[in-house]
Image (cartoon, helix red, strand yellow):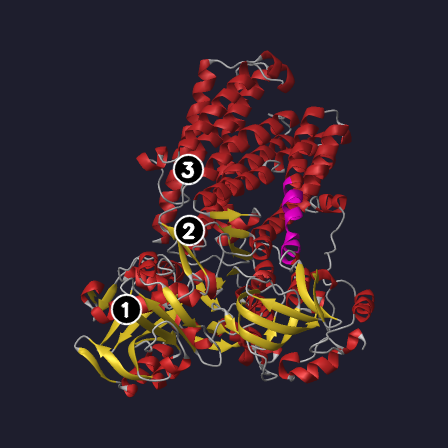
């Protein structure tokens, strides 16, 4: 048998003997050791291939591939050639710090593949030469016969040929919320991944029973391997902010280059300045116009957002994801473990004369019972008491925990029954001690029920049975009511089951009976008929209590929420309806029948997708992105990892999520709470607002300085500021002021407005107007005061100090204007709502005092101390700028009304 004959077979649709023949193996004998070794040598080990990773130095150099960074490098080179080593060092430091941050973050991105490889089993029990033996899972080959038992991690993709009550937890691969009951009979060729009940997939967990399977895929050919390959092939896309900043940097660079060239030509050809002098002036112009501090402002503003989100349980792994959250238009959410708890819960209890609703979600025994929307005391309902006790005693699971943290050991359905008993008032551990189990009939797929025999300390026997409703309705003769046992009303129970099944609930029946005469053993004859039906329970993995509010908050913010799950369609529709996610539903099988060009319409027009595979999730995210949507994908399983990586923001669950999901995502929810996403979106929008505020605060500094170079050149005046003073203003003062805006809280209406367009420029026409308007005010004030000082006969160094301080303190007053783009700031909240503003102003005042009065800085920057009158005019100029901008806000607000 050649390896290329094996992959891509529909193993799930073949009978067991045909599979054995195809792979050249034997049910009892397995492979020979020699054959297994030959196949291992030919096909390779059962492990996922390591990813290709570029060399570290290449990744580091890639961080410099940005137009704005190129301009900064050129500025550093020119200032170095001119002998300004301090200036060159400052600019180079900004460039290198940004590169290091990007390098470190990118180094984390490929760890998702390592996490998937860690899911593989370490050991496997195989049959070779007719003997059972334990081997390393890496040494498994196609054709090996593998034994499975409870607690095993499946070591490869297996076609099951024998099972005994085998149940496997496949949520990480398929999204199925319950452990799947396995059987050896073939299924249809078109069966979805989650419906292939005759297959066991690599990396999944056996929760109950035993099985025997034949290895049909190893390493990269397994379903886990296919997910790993998809993850490797997915190219993460650039974030809206990075695209906007790249476009802004290109435009800014071209504008600066064009203006510099024009000024150089005008100065040399019109004003007849020497070429060398004009070259130095143009270099000063370029240094003045390039916002050297902008990369640092952006990085630190995003970092502040990261810290805020961490306080709200959202851990950001990649800085640009902070802002991208604010641009989200669609959230594609996995159901199991994200919108729901991934903890089975009894939602309804059907009694012979009542339908009870059960509150509470998950395994925590907190909740109660209602009848017709009225609370009821469970201890006042004897039949409910008997049914819940029976559910707890006919049970092999254990409920463990305290407070809000509860989990189970054993089957999730049985865990839900233990929680039900605790809500009904039973101390399950105490009751098991009072009524110890003396015999049992374990659950068998063939019989569809479990029965247990108990005796209290007085010797009285108790017989309890739980199982499928269809089976127990045939085994029961009576039903229990508050007034005693009456004849079984089969039609009533079937109708109630049908109603709850439509709500996506899975039904389980609970009955009791009389032990046999000997009282110590339990046989099938004891439970074959004559039982009394106590109740039926409807079980579901319910929505998180807070998820409903979070979905509503997202809708209010203009964000569409879509559910994408591997679970059954009925269950998905029911949960989606409870969460307020409306619209059509499609299954994976229906998606497979769509042509490629119909996917974007289907992805946009449908809000619930059920029974989907990892490929479907990835294609749905990509299809939405072709519609210019900014997409988030949330999930916790290995099957979610490729879509998480492809999404604009991949959001993984931190508590119950797999390591593969967490490493593929750009954000991790520390509390596994979908509601945290709504908080993160709010913070993301605030970060974007703050970035815009920081830019409109910083850029007038650069433009005003450029004007203070251009205007004197064209007017034949001496330059009010030199290159080293420009760098002082750009790197020390502008950054100090702009960073205070990174700490601005979210504005009140931030979650009531629609998401911004992904292609929206970071600076709108209004913001460009504001920047030009303020630049003109600041440049005019600085030039006027420079000329005033010069006309008063002040030394050149004093004139420089007056010009620089006017520029800086006009920007300082304007900082307060920037807290709100249009709202007035001359009020208590506007002036004192952000304490970091005043800390920045205090720091700036100290910096400028040092700049003006320290002799060492006077020599370095060619400045001299100023007198009181000069400071008065500087401060008045700042106040005028602040007042004029507030008037401009008022006029624009009136005009927009």
- Provide the secondary structure element on which disc 3 rests: helix
Mark 3, residue position: 817
Nearer to us: label 1 or label 2: 1
Mark 2, residue position: 679
Nearer to us: label 3 or label 2: 2
Q: State the residue at coordinates (56%, 16%).
A: 798
Between the residue at mark 3 and the residue at mark 1, the CA separation in whole angstroms equals 83 Å
Q: Is residue 321 above or below residue 260?
A: below
Q: Quadrant of residue 138?
A: bottom right
Percent of width and height locating residue 864:
57, 14
- Provide the secondary structure element on which disc 1 rests: loop
Mark 1, residue position: 460
Q: Furthest residue to the front?
A: 518
Q: Quadrant of residue 477?
A: bottom left
Between the residue at mark 3 and the residue at mark 2, the CA separation in whole angstroms equals 27 Å
Q: Which residues are magenta?
A: 101-116
- Image check: 660 left or right of 574? right
- Provide the secondary structure element on which disc 2 rests: helix
Figure label count:
3
Percent of width and height locating residue 87:
67, 27
Q: State the residue at coordinates (68%, 38%).
A: 72
Badge 3 or badge 2: first in the primary sequence: 2
Q: Is residue 438 magenta?
A: no
Badge 1 or badge 2: first in the primary sequence: 1
Percent of width and height locating residue 368:
26, 61
């Amino acid at each position: 048998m050649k390896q290329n004959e094996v992959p891509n077979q529909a193993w799930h649709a073949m009978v067991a003997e045909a599979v054995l023949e195809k792979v050249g193996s034997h049910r009892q004998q397995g492979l020979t050791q020699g054959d297994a070794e030959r196949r291992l040598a030919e096909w390779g080990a059962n492990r996922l291939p390591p990813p290709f990773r570029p060399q570290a130095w290449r990744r580091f150099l890639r961080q410099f591939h940005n137009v704005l960074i190129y301009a900064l490098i050129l500025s550093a080179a020119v200032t170095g050639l001119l002998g300004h080593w301090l200036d060159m060092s400052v600019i180079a430091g900004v460039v290198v710090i940004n590169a290091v941050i990007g390098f470190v973050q990118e180094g984390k991105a490929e760890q998702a593949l390592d996490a998937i490889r860690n899911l593989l089993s370490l050991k496997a029990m195989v049959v070779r030469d007719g003997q059972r033996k334990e081997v390393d899972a890496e040494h498994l080959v196609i054709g090996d016969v593998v034994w499975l038992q409870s607690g095993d991690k499946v070591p490869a993709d297996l076609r099951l040929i024998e099972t005994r009550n085998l149940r496997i937890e496949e949520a990480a691969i398929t999204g199925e919320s319950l452990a799947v009951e396995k059987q050896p009979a073939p299924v249809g060729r078109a069966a979805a991944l989650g419906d292939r009940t005759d297959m066991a997939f690599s990396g999944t967990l056996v929760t109950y029973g035993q099985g025997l399977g034949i290895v049909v895929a190893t390493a990269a050919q397994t379903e886990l391997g296919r997910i790993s390959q998809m993850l490797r092939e997915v190219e993460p896309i650039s974030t809206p902010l990075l695209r906007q900043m790249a476009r802004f940097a290109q435009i800014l660079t071209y504008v600066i280059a064009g203006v510099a060239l024009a000024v150089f030509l005008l100065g040399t050809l019109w004003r007849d300045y020497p070429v060398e002098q004009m070259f130095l002036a143009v270099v000063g112009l370029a240094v003045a116009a390039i916002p050297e501090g902008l990369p640092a402002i952006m990085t630190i503003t995003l970092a502040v957002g990261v810290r805020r989100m961490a306080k709200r349980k959202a851990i950001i792994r990649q800085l640009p994801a902070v802002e991208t959250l604010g641009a989200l238009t669609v959230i594609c959410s996995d159901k199991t473990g994200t919108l729901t708890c991934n903890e089975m819960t009894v939602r309804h209890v059907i009694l012979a004369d009542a339908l009870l609703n059960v509150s509470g979600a998950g395994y925590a025994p907190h909740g109660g019972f209602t009848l017709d929307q009225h609370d009821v005391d469970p201890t006042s309902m004897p039949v409910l008491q008997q049914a819940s006790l029976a559910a707890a005693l006919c049970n092999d699971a254990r409920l463990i925990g305290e407070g809000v943290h509860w989990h189970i050991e054993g089957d999730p359905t049985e865990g839900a029954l233990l929680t039900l008993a605790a809500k009904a008032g039973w101390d399950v551990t105490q009751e098991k001690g009072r009524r110890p189990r003396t015999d049992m009939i374990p659950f068998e797929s063939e019989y569809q029920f479990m029965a247990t025999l108990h005796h209290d300390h007085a010797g009285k026997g108790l017989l309890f049975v739980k199982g499928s409703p269809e089976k127990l309705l045939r085994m029961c003769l009576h039903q229990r009511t508050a007034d005693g046992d009456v004849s079984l009303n089969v039609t009533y129970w079937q109708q109630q089951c049908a109603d709850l099944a439509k709500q996506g609930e899975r039904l389980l029946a609970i009955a009791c009976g009389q032990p046999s005469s000997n009282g110590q053993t339990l046989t099938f004859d004891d439970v074959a008929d004559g039982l009394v039906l106590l109740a039926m329970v409807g079980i579901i993995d319910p929505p998180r209590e807070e998820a409903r509010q979070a979905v509503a908050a997202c809708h209010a913010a203009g964000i569409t929420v879509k559910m994408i799950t591997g679970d059954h369609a009925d269950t998905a529709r029911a949960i989606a309806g409870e969460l307020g996610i409306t619209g059509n539903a499609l299954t994976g099988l229906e998606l497979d029948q769509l042509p490629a060009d119909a996917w974007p319409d289907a992805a946009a027009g449908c809000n619930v997708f059920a029974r989907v595979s990892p490929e479907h999730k990835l294609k749905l995210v990509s299809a939405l992105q072709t519609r210019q949507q900014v997409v988030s994908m949330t999930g916790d399983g290995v099957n979610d990892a490729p879509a998480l990586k492809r999404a604009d923001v991949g959001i993984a669950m931190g508590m119950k999520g797999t390591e593969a999901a967490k490493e593929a995502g750009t954000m991790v929810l520390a509390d596994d709470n979908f509601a945290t996403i709504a908080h993160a979106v709010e913070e993301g929008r605030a970060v974007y607002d703050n970035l815009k505020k920081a830019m409109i605060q910083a850029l007038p500094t650069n433009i005003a300085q450029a004007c203070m170079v251009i205007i004197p050149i064209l007017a034949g005046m001496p330059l009010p500021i030199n290159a080293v003073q420009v760098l002082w203003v750009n790197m020390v003062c502008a950054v100090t002021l702009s960073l205070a805006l990174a700490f601005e809280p979210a504005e009140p209406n931030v979650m009531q407005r629609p998401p911004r367009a992904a292609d929206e420029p970071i600076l709108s026409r209004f913001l460009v107007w504001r920047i030009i308007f303020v630049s003109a005010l600041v440049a005019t004030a600085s030039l006027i005061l420079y000329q005033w000082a010069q006309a008063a006969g002040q030394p050149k160094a004093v004139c420089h100090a007056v010009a620089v301080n006017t520029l800086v303190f006009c920007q300082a007053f304007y900082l307060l204007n920037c807290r709100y783009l249009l709202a007035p700031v001359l009020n208590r909240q506007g002036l004192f709502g952000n304490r970091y503003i005043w800390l920045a102003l205090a720091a700036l005042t100290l910096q400028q005092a040092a700049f003006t009065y320290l002799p060492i800085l006077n020599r370095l920057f060619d400045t001299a101390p100023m007198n009181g009158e000069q400071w008065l005019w500087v401060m008045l100029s700042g106040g005028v700028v602040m007042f004029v901008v507030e008037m401009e806000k008022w006029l624009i607000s009136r005009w927009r009304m």
